[in-house]
Amino acid sequence: MTFKPSKPQPPRTSTLLFRDDPLGAAVADLKRRRLLKGAGALLAGAATPFMFTGEAWAATEATPITLSGAKQGGTLTAVLHPEPPTLAFFVNSATMIGAVASKIFDGLVEYGPDLKPRPQLAESWTVSPDSLTWTFKLRQNATWHDGKPFTSADVKFSAEEVWLKISPAARRVLQYLTKIDTPDAHTVVLYLSKSTPATFGILDSLGTPILPKHLYENTDIRNNPYNNKPIGTGPFKFTEWLRGDRIVLDRYEKYWAPGQPYLDRLTWKITPDVSGRATALETGAAQYGERNPVTFADADRLAKLPNLIVSREGYNGYAAWFWLEPNLRDPILAKLEVRQAIAHAINRDVLVATVWGGYAVPATGPEASLVKAFYTPDTQQYPYDPKRAEALLDKAGFPKQADGWRFKLNHDFIPYGDDYRRTGEFVRQALRRVGIDVTLRGQDLPTWLKNVFTEYNFQLISSWGTDGLDPQIGIEQHYWSKAESKGTPWFNASGYASPEMDRVIEAAQTETDPAKRRDLYFQLQRIAQRDLSLINLFEFRWFGVWAKNLRNVTDTASHSRANFARVWFDKA
């Protein structure tokens, strides 16, 4: 199987999706708003385990994807929230870290809007008929930002020391990688002991990070000083990080793609206040915001301005869902009836309508409905039923006491902004109505990450994650007992361990028959909804905001993790 570069995407335009949608609209009207115009399959029609195809799932207004008339110059200022705790993207897969790091580092491939791999550091690649040998031909003109040549030795070092030992997703997906050969300076051969269908969904810059061997060899990689002043191969080089203010990247003059990048500078302005982000975008102080950078009311308002675009495009490969995660080490939350009661106590329809402004849909499980190839709604559901919730709590041995409470519970919401705090408040009120005395606790991001993923010092958290191009990349890590990795964010923190779930996950990892693999992931979703180690609440419907004269923002599967080499200002 030989892969060649795909043809450039033709220019596209479509109609604006965002309409006036006041918060608190009647729930009876929610179904209409939830019908996303143009919804399509993220992974529908996959012909082989290694081909990802799909169509845009949201019809939104966007500028054409084109390099015709591309102009050099200009500084793009982007709002960033929250501030990254680190730029070590190969250790911490937090979204805001990847948004910055993906501009500094290139991967072997990137993924287009159609979700198919496109050449990046690898010019071409060949996969053997048994899918066990992967050969990559590397670019000969790529260099690190310190001027050193990029070679196959960097890939081999990164594979052996980062992918297989550190990188959160790669060490799972590539667990059957047994050998890496470098026949010459620009050829890398990967040998697998078992075929792994998800391999081609993880070969981008964030999935399989490539670090400079000459700066990381024989060092403590997790604590290398270059982690926060990175040297990459991407279109932008790191210039400075002023904590609490900004991260500045400048154009790398020797980037391997002729004439690229087009932008002279990319400044990430750290803007924790949501109203401040809206003001910056409205006034032109910032020209880009990814991943729901403003409130939904502001999104509707900004969409009407002549200088801005509010769009759901550019997230074809970024389906994501939101959950509550109970600590199963806690004697209260270890009881299934308690988790079922929590699930029944929360009205998901009202949550997505009032807190998320209709820009979310209730989840039926851990797989987003946008990922048609692997999604099934045929799972156990927990409709809003507070009386049922109270009966389950009674059954679990937690009747109401004289003060009206059954037990106390701490809920630590993910500190990503006001929408997440308000979601936590919604959950608090819902659980208090059935007799659970919930304390909502706000923490800074480093503290939250440490408490949840290193110390396991929590009772109930709210969090979210992406499904990725394949369930093995995005979902498996939350349910596989072997994925529990102390100190690694967004892995199995609940302590969930199920031999039945492990068997299903491990069978799916190497199943090459698409129909059988699909059925295994259907089983995963059914077990997940039965056991409720995650209480899945809703799926996101992401949008971005950017200046109308900014081109090529949506030229990849997710502009949150694109390198922006082809992004340009029509009027710099």
Image (cartoon, rainbow, N blue to C red):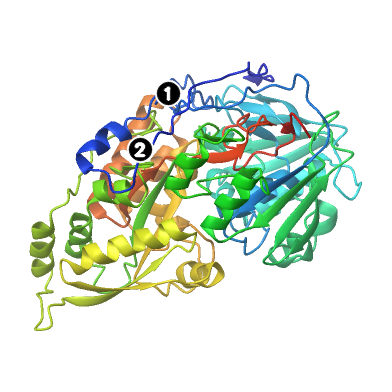
Extreme residue in the right direction: 147
Residue sitting at 67 percent across and 66 percent down?
244
On the image, the x and y values in percent for residue 537 come to 31, 50
Of badges 1 and 2, the one in the foreground is 1
Please rate how many residues cluster around mark 1, counting C-alpha atoms within 10 Å: few if below 14, some from 14 to 19, many from 20.
some
Is there a contact, CB below 8 Å, between mark 1 and mark 2?
no
| Res 192 quadrant in image | top right
Q: Please, what secondary structure does the residue beneath circle 2 have? A: helix
Residue sitting at 46 percent across and 25 percent down?
59
In depth, the one of 558 and 347 nearer the eye is 347
Residue sitting at 47 percent across and 74 percent down?
455
Quadrant placement of the C terminus: top right
On the image, the x and y values in percent for residue 346 come to 23, 56
Is residue 523 something one can see in this rendering? Answer: yes
Type of the residue with mark 2? Tyr
Quadrant placement of the N terminus: top right
Q: Please, what secondary structure does the residue beneath circle 1 have? A: loop
Q: Is residue 76 left or right of residue 435?
A: right
What mark, if any, has residue 449 been given in the picture?
none
Name the residue that disc number 1 marks: 44
What mark, if any, has residue 521 been given in the picture?
2
Extreme residue in the bottom direction: 402
| Res 218 quadrant in image | bottom right
- Give whichever of discs 1 and 2 has the lower sequence position: 1
Type of the residue with mark 1? Ala
Q: Is residue 203 left or right of residue 211?
A: left
